[in-house]
């Protein structure tokens, strides 16, 4: 189970890195671009929070 969560975390980190690379090479940013990036990062953060909660529950079943 822990490996699955760490794999998920690594995937999310790769996605964040790819978003950063994409934005770094872009010359013009529209409100739509920024909104999409913010929403994407928010979704990834939500996934990380869920994974962290799962990890915490599995580590401390009494919690």
Image: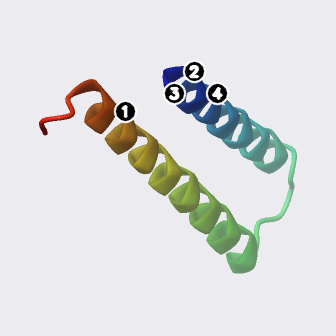
- Residue under the point 57% across and 21% down: 3
- Residue under the point 73% across and 78% down: 32
Q: In what element is the residue under mark 2?
A: helix
Decide: is 22 above or below 17: below
From the viewer's perspective, is 4 left or right of 31? Answer: left
Query: What is the distance, in whole Å, between disc 4 and disc 3 at their CAs?
Result: 10 Å
Decide: is 61 above or below 23: above
Q: Which residue ends up furthest to the bottom in the rendered image?
A: 32
Query: What is the distance, in whole Å, between disc 2 and disc 1 at their CAs?
Result: 10 Å
Q: Position of residue 47 (x, y in %)?
A: 51, 51
Query: What is the distance, in whole Å, between disc 3 and disc 1 at their CAs?
Result: 8 Å
Please give the label number shown on residue 7: 4
- Residue under the point 64% across and 61% down: 40
Quadrant in which residue 41 is drawn? bottom right
Q: Position of residue 56 (x, y in %)?
A: 28, 33
- Which residue is denoted by mark 1 in the rendering? 55
- Which residue is denoted by mark 3 in the rendering? 1
């Amino acid at each position: 189970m822990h490996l699955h969560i760490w794999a998920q975390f690594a995937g999310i980190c790769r996605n964040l890195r790819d978003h950063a690379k994409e934005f770094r090479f872009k010359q013009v940013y529209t409100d739509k671009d920024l909104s999409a990036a913010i929403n994407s990062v928010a979704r990834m953060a939500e996934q990380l929070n869920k994974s962290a909660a799962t990890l915490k529950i599995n580590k401390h079943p009494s919690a």
